[in-house]
Image: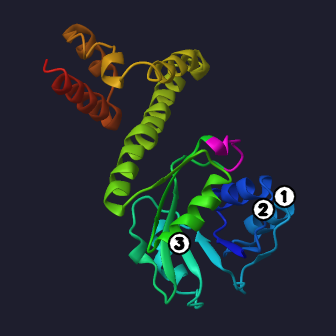
């Protein structure tokens, strides 16, 4: 089976790397960013192009959500299977005469961050059982956690991921702003962060909650509010109110 990956970003890179590590050949990686594609090509030994899309049996579109529809129109082969990697869009966003699918890896991808691909959940959707079986076999070659998922379910998977990953990472960034403002090394907080994440392997997050809001400690809450201003203050108030509502304080 000829496979082409479309995209030059983090998801395209990691999918290419995961397949290459399992000796699954990629016929081409295609995109607009010549420098990034050249880097991927040199590292993984995959042919690349910025202007001529190769013929393939399977195209995996790993581009930004807003670009999926436009990119999908480049594929003209009615015999091809085309899957996007978005968690938030239906397969009907793909515009072409081919068979449509979704191949969604639930993970945060950074270019130079090593990942254990076998632990990444993959959520798949296809128009027919044969295509679903094909994508399941492909995903199972790199992951031990492969599932079928409808678009209705996948929307909520992606929404949960935004809360559990993107928002949490933003809070880390805001925390580092505060520590930097007082010349406190952010590394001091890494054991706390690691323990916070480790705990939810054995405790439901709701049971693991600590801090002044869940204790309803007004003195500490007021002290913290005096130390903050602007957006961090609004975030602090909003999150504390959410904690109070969850525990009915």
Q: Is residue 98 rendered to the left or right of residue 90?
A: right
Residue pushed farthest left? 248
The quadrant the C terminus occupies is top left
Q: Residues within 10 Å of mark 3 (few under 14, many from 20)?
A: few
Q: Which residue is mark 1?
A: 43
**Mark 2 near mark 3, Cβ–Cβ under 8 Å?**
no
Residue visible at 66% across and 80% down in the picture: 57
CA separation in Å, label 3 and label 1: 33 Å
Q: Residue at x 51, y 49 (%)?
A: 106
Tag on residue 130? 3
Magenta stretch, overall SS:
loop
Residues at marks 2 and 1, CA–CA distance in whole angstroms: 5 Å
Q: Secondary structure at mark 1?
A: helix
**Mark 2 lies on residue:** 40
Q: Position of residue 101 (x, y in %)?
A: 48, 71
Left or right of 73, for residue 10? right
Q: Determine the CA span between mark 2 and mark 3.
A: 31 Å
Q: Position of residue 80 (x, y in %)?
A: 59, 83
Rate crowding at label 1 as few (under 14), some (14 to 19) or many (20 or more) other CA atoms within 10 Å. Answer: few
Tell me which numbered mark, 2 or 3, is placed earlier along the sequence.
2
Mark 3 or 1, closer to the camera = 3
**Is 231 situated above or below 210?**
below
- Note whether 140 is above or below 32 in the view shown: above
Residue at the image position 79 percent from the left and 52 percent from the top: 21
220 vs 32, nearest the viewer: 32
Spot occupied by residue 243 in the image (x, y as percentages of width and height): 24, 25
Q: Please provide percent x and percent y for residue 43.
A: 84, 58
Q: Mark 2 and mark 1 in contact? Answer it, CB < 8 Å.
A: yes
Region of the chain picked out in magenta, as a range? 111-118
At 82% from the left edge and 73% from the top edge, which residue is drawn? 47
- The correct choice, above or below, for 61 with respect to 199 in the image is below
């Amino acid at each position: 089976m000829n496979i082409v990956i479309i995209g030059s970003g983090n998801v395209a890179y990691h999918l290419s790397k995961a397949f290459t590590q399992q000796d699954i050949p990629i016929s081409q990686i295609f995109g607009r960013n010549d420098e990034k594609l050249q880097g991927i090509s040199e590292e993984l030994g995959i042919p690349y192009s910025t202007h001529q899309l190769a013929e393939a049996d399977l195209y995996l579109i790993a581009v930004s959500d807003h670009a999926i529809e436009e990119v999908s129109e480049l594929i003209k082969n009615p015999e091809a299977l085309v899957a996007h990697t978005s968690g938030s869009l239906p397969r009907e966003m793909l515009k072409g005469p081919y068979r449509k699918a979704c191949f969604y890896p639930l993970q945060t991808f950074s270019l130079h961050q090593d990942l254990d691909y076998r632990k990444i959940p993959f959520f798949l959707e296809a128009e027919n059982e044969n295509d679903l079986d094909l994508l399941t076999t492909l995903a199972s070659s790199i992951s031990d956690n492969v599932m079928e998922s409808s678009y209705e379910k996948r929307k909520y998977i992606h929404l949960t991921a935004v809360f559990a990953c993107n928002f949490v990472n933003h809070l880390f960034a805001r925390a580092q702003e505060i520590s930097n403002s007082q010349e406190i090394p952010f590394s001091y907080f890494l054991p706390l962060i690691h323990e916070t994440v480790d705990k939810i392997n054995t405790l439901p997050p709701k049971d693991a909650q600590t801090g002044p809001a869940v204790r309803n400690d007004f003195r500490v809450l007021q002290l913290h509010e005096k130390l903050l201003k602007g957006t961090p203050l609004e975030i602090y108030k909003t999150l504390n109110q959410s904690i109070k509502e969850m525990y009915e304080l």
